[in-house]
Amino acid sequence: MINLIVIAISAIMFALLLVWWRWPAFRAWIETPKYSMLCQERRFDDQ
Amino acid sequence: MTTFAQSLAGGNEQDNTQNLGALPALEYGLIRAHVFASFAGVVISVLFGILVATKFTFPEFLGGHAWLTWGRLRYNHTEGILFGWLGNAFLAFCYYVVPRLANRPVSSHKVGWFLFWIWNFAVVLPGWVLVLAGFGQPLEWAEFPLVVAAFVVLAFILMVFEFVLPFLRARLSDLYVSGWYIIGGIIFTMLAYPVGNLAPQFVPGARGAAFSGLWIHDVVGLFATPFALAIAYYVIPATTRRPIFSHFLSMVGFWVLFFIYPMNGTHHYVYSAIPMAAQKGAIVASAYLGVDVILVVSNLLLSLRGSSGIASKDLPLRFTWFGVISYLVVSLQGSLQSLMPINRFIHFTDWVIGHSHLAMIGFPSFMALGGIAHLWKRIPGTRYNERVMNWSFWLLAVGLTLMVADLTIAGLVEGQVWQSSAPWIDSVRAVRSYWLVRTLSGLPILAGFVLFWTSLVTGPRLSETVTSGNSREASENVGAVENVSPVSDKASWTGWLSHAHVVAFGAGVGFFALSFIVLAIIPGKELEDEIKQAAPVTMATLTASEQRGRVIYGREGCAYCHTEQVRSLAADVRRFGAPTEAWETKYDYPHLWGTRRIGPDLSREFNLHSRDWQLTHLYNPRLVVRDSMMPPYPWFFAGSANQPTQEALDLLAYLESLGRARQLSGFERQALASSVQSGTSDMAMAGEPSGRATPPTVPIAMTGGYSPSAPLLHPASDPDDLQEEVSRGGTVFVANCASCHGAAGRGDGKASASLLPKPADLTAARFSDERLSSVLWNGVAGSAMPPWRQLPTEDLRALFAYIHSLQVADAAPPAQEATSINEGKALFAANCASCHGDTGAGKGPAGGVLAPAPTNFHLKKPTEERAWDVLENGVPGTAMPPWRSQLSADQRRALVEFVRSLYDPPQENSGQ
């Protein structure tokens, strides 16, 4: 069971890395929130 | 789909801003209320901690009052930090950040205030009062009574309504990592908290410990860590005005954290009776977690690249940076601690306490301070005093560093002593100075928190409408935000990607449930089967008195100093006996295994000490153990150790039940027989214990019971060596024996008033080498005299020589009339032989069932005065009655002469 969990988590991590590496659009999508957060922060500061 | 990134990339910021609609309102009143409540909470909690630490050095300090006893204050210290301080601080930050991240206000102003009142006036305050009043429960991080726990759950449900709903109403595909951590922290804590509180109440012993262990770690991993990282991920970009290094890495870190952290809990019970598969799973998960933390910290530190100037000047960022570094150190430390070679040495020691303080102060507390400082200079009307806050930072940083370093070293010292065969009290003596330093290191920490609060209320006064000082900077720097390739609305995969978070969230809940299945339910089933097979059919439940004593034991926090689990380790078994097996905990609701040893393990307490010793020890431990730091419990007595109340008797009954089932079922006798047969003096598990309950194969070193392998000690034959031995023995005697036997060995120590039989007057008899060796090695069954075989051989020899030196030189025996001796012999045969035996060797027909055993006059020669006194008054606390009403003075005098004439030790003083 433990081996299964380790393998599952490792597989998920590698799958994510693979997706990130192979699809630039995924990279752009997943990185979007870090810009939106700053945009929102600026809106509040400008209030 | 249009994202913020696309908006920024489009270049028309005004339009994009308009698309986002009006800014959501923030609950400034609630932010301030929770900030001030958090500082009230932390100051009181740290004061609890300092009182607790002070009692390590001065155990009598505030020791006469039940409400101020060590255990209850200790409960309130940790629960106060968790709920009073961190809970309020995190809530304040949530009210600040959730509307910004969700672009929606929190759900309800009224619910917010209701939550505030619930949190502080139905959880923190009543929790503290109830624990001080004696209603605490002995579950780590769940010490508040169940009635309070119900309000905690209600509070988390309100948090879901208040903070999670706004996120759910927003688009999850745009959700920043801080929002994820807030959602995860609230939901997973809401799920884990009831399990950690309730399961051990209904699932006994080892099975319940498996659940409890999960919550012990979940409180750090699923509550403190997510909120602290939410703050870090927010404060860093908001201060530097640059996006974090990688949102992808932050999300990988987030999910791995929630997948892995729940699996860690069982690493608190390595080498226990919990099935090895669960232990190893927790160890593997702990190692995995270390990798995840490296990932998260790298991402956070890379987010600070090129911002060293800001980090050094901006106080909120400096607090956050310190928290990030602490997170790295404490997490790697945690991963290492779970590894068996390290765990076997440092577990239960102060090392872990240092780790805990770094975990709760260094990491989430510094993050919370950073978050509060950050929001304080951005909400209307509040600013902080930079100079005072700067002092606060350094006081906290220096105090914490000193405390952690001190406790870490103390833990190594304790671990070293525990590996040896030195008496337990030696480990207490060895770290006394470290405990004093720990107490002192708490003072700058307290001052740091007070100054932080001072800095918040002594900042420049601003009107409510003043905007952030960084507003201009924000406008200037926003252009520096990196562009990003817009996501095509036409890309078909974005559809399912937008739901990927939901899928991942479901997976997170699944892993959370899996952690309970893998680490608690499956091992629990295995344990249940094992218990059915192994538990003796004669194993009795606790009596009503023992059950009441168990409740007292729990509410007074005894389990926080005394474990009730002997681990499958050579050092543990040598000291306490065979490893604890699951069936022994069959009736333990909740389990009392404990995760710390300041005092010795108590799972083999049955028959270890006499009742009067136990009561005297409870009344004031230093009456019988001079250097003990255990708190006194005078409120269990009506003025003296001889006058126990029902509560003292209940607690005593419980203590005497510990290990009873095992001994009565014959397990220990099997162990002893096995070791005697094999001739081993050390355990056979010195290689690598399996972690499962290992068949006992060694003599029980510390526990009572006669050991046939007692060595025959002799004083040194060389006068110089003898002098040296006597000198050393005097020191050992004062440290270990004088509290009962008195400084001069006359049996008049402080504890003697409440011990029956009285401690021996060592000047009133001559002991043969064999008798004295046996007493030192085995103790005296039926009396308070414990075995001292765990002392180093040199100390035993020195003690032996010193006790010999106390004995008054026997004057040349007067010529005894044969008629007197014969009369004494006849009287002895008629009145004494049934106990003392025909030859006076203490082996009469009735002697075998008496404890203490009748005196063997061949090995012990009382002085005339002592023998006369015994015949006059008997020996209270033993089977020896007074004979003055049955024998005339002449007859008694004849008996005295006769028993003194029997002294005939073999191989006396051979000098080897």
Image (cartoon, coloured by chain):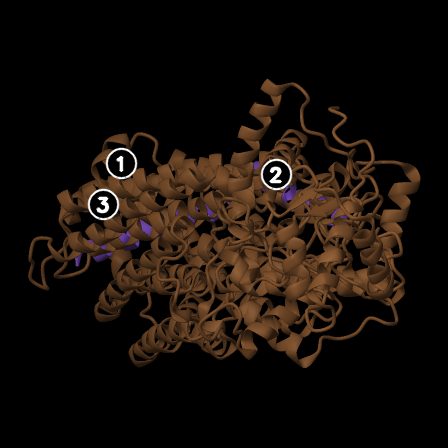
Chain colours: A purple, B brown
Q: Is residue B720 above or below residue A37?
A: above
* Residue B392 circle label: 3
* Residue B311 circle label: 1
Determine whether, in the image, residue B742 is placed left or right of residue B165.
right
Q: Amino acid at mark 2?
A: Ile
* Residue B803 circle label: 2
Quick one: label 1, few (<14), some, or many (20+) residues within 10 Å? Answer: many
Q: Amino acid at mark 3?
A: Ser
- Judged from the image, the secondary structure of the residue bearing numbered disc 1 is helix
Please check whether the numbered discs 2 and 3 fall on a single chain: yes
In the image, what residue occupies the spot 61% across and 53% down? B259
Q: Is residue B4 above or below residue B163?
A: above
- Does the rendering let one see residue B782? yes
Question: Mark 1 falls within which chain?
Answer: B
Q: Which comes sooner in the sequence, label 2 or label 3? A: 3
Give how far across and how far down residue B233 sits, in percent.
38, 47
In the image, what residue occupies the spot 81% across and 40% down? B904
Give how far across and how far down residue B769 sits, in percent.
74, 37
- Does the rendering let one see residue B609? no
* Residue B650 circle label: none
